[in-house]
Amino acid sequence: MRKFKPWMFVYLVLFIGLTFVSVKNDAENHYPIVYVFLGSFAYTIFNAGIVLYALDVRHEAIKRTWRYLFPYLIAYFVTSFVIDSLFGMHADLRPRGILLDIVIFIFGIIIFFPAFRASFVLAYKQIVTVPDRQ
């Protein structure tokens, strides 16, 4: 029996809100359109992964696909943090040290952890099939 995860749908609603805010901020920061597109693509993958994980969808094609997408999601998360901290609209408004950047990065990991976990499980969890009884 598959395990339905209703709490992930609550997280999904919050994450969709984060998606709209993040993409809007990327556009307002006048980042290149390619970067905004890649960010939108990453958030789409995150949201799809949350839905698939919440519904406990298991299929070999999804697993193969997510093995390629999961590293992209990690790379996007790290690069977006670096780009926002260096070039974002609030990057030069106040002097800040490395400690504040580390705290912000850890807070981002906490917010994104369920989405990363969902994508990780989709990519790397073994698919167990139970043979039919004859």
Image: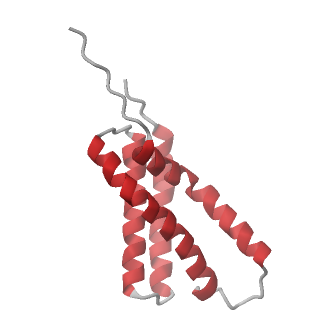
Q: Nearer the viewer, residue 122 or 92?
A: 122
Which residue corresponds to the image point at 27% horizontal and 19% vertical from the top-left? 131
Image coordinates of residue 124 in percent, x first then y, are 43, 44
Image coordinates of residue 95 in percent, x first then y, are 78, 88
Q: Is residue 92 visible?
A: yes
Which part of the image, by quadrant, shows the N terminus? top left
Q: Nearer the viewer, residue 25 or 2?
A: 2
Which residue corresponds to the image point at 74% horizontal and 67% vertical from the top-left? 103
Q: Is residue 89 visible?
A: no
| Vertical position of residue 58 compared to residue 129: above or below | below
Which part of the image, by quadrant, shows the C terminus? top left
**Residue 19 falls left or right of residue 78:** left
Image coordinates of residue 83 in percent, x first then y, are 56, 81
Image coordinates of residue 111 in percent, x first then y, are 60, 58
Which quadrant of the view contains residue 98? bottom right
**Residue 107 falls left or right of residue 54:** right
Q: In this view, which residue lies farthest toward the left? A: 134
Q: In this view, which residue lies farthest toward the top? A: 134
Give the colour scheme of this rendering. secondary structure
Which residue corresponds to the image point at 53% horizontal and 75% vertical from the top-left? 80
**Residue 34 falls left or right of residue 96:** left
Which residue corresponds to the image point at 41% horizontal and 36% vertical from the top-left? 126
**Residue 34 falls left or right of residue 76:** left
How many numbered badges does the structure rendering display? 0
| Vertical position of residue 32 compared to residue 47: above or below | below
